Amino acid sequence: QHPQPGSQALPAPALAPDQLPQNNTLVALPIVAIENILSFMSYDEISQLRLVCKRMDLVCQRMLNQGFLKVERYHNLCQKQVKAQLPRRESERRNHSLARHADILAAVETRLSLLNMTFMKYVDSNLCCFIPGKVIDEIYRVLRYVNSTRAPQRAHEVLQELRDISSMAMEYFDEKIVPILKRKLPGSDVSGRLMGSPPVPGPSAALTTMQLFSKQNPSRQEVTKLQQQVKTNGAGVTVLRREISELRTKVQEQQKQLQDQDQKLLEQTQIIGEQNARLAELERKLREVMESAVGNSSGSGQNEESPRKRKKATEAIDSLRKSKRLRNRK
């Protein structure tokens, strides 16, 4: 029945949070079925579907985490296929038809490593998921482009969009989301690692100065470990300084060689200019000798002098040929 004019319609009864409408069949399906349906969508769309409800959020988080692991495996497969076709010599790889493919895949590997270090530490601790689904879509696009194209564009042209969106995603995650995750963990130390959990192998497992000073009574073993780390870092810095000094010496030597080459080039240019001037002078003299020889050949009384002039003309031609050879050698 329709409400009478002037009367107010009764509000619909509110549903409990755990109750679902009967017509909402998608969320009521098993998780495997929901994942199969969502697999036909892009990861960017999957990341946006997290706002639907808590159940959909859990399903989308799982698919985003699995998507990042799948794209890593797909990249490793593509890289193995390309490396199997490349020659072993580094000099021959540069001129190979798959050189650009290898460069693009190497740049994607670097980008995947940065994303792994940024997100997966918190993903493994079940604090969040791999949030930027658009980054996964872009990585898949680049990998499929590399596999389907024989002559791809340069690496910076292909990876421009991937670098932009991945850099923005990592910066936003570090600046906005990581502080929130650390504040929500009362049982975490300075580095953000859960107390009592095993350290992750890598740079995060090293004992930092902040962790040492945060403790009132650090043990002797921790102090010794920190001293060993300081010594190791000092040795590494010394090696890097030595390498930098060697590189500077090589650069100075190369600059000196370039200056010497410029000086030699200037001298050669001056010599070539002098040879051109001499060549022009010899050509002028040759024309004069030839003209005089032609003018005097008409008179019968001057037949005795013609052999001398012919000899002079021959000498001029020989000198002209010698100057040309000398110029070619320079």
Image (cartoon, helix red, strand yellow):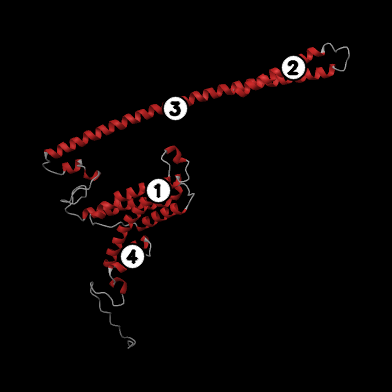
Which mark identifies residue 105?
Answer: 1
Which residue matches tag 3?
A: 254
Q: Amino acid at mark 3?
A: Gln
Distance between the alpha carbons at the discs numbered 1 and 3: 33 Å
| Lateral position of residue 172 relative to residue 209, left or right | right
Residue in the foreground of this view, choosing between 250 and 300? 300
Q: Nearer the viewer, mark 2 or mark 3?
A: 2
Q: Secondary structure at mark 4?
A: helix
Q: Nearer the viewer, mark 2 or mark 4?
A: 2
- Label 2 and label 4: CA atoms lie apart by 96 Å
Dot 2 amino acid type: Thr
Residue 180 sits in quarter? bottom left
User: Amino acid under label 4?
Assistant: Leu
* Identity of the residue drawn at 69% across and 20% down: 320
Q: Earlier in the sequence, mark 2 or mark 1?
A: 1
Q: Which mark is first along the chain, 3 or 2?
A: 3
Which percent across, then down, holds residue 258? 48, 26
Q: Which residue is mark 2?
A: 314
Closer to the N terminus: mark 3 or mark 4? 4
Q: Which residue is mark 4?
A: 49
State the CA–CA distance, disc 2 to disc 3.
49 Å
How crowded pointer 2 is (Cα within 10 Å; few <14, some 14-19, many 20+) is rated as: some
Q: Amino acid at mark 1?
A: Leu
Indicate the position of residue 82 as horizontal and vertical percent values. Answer: 41, 48
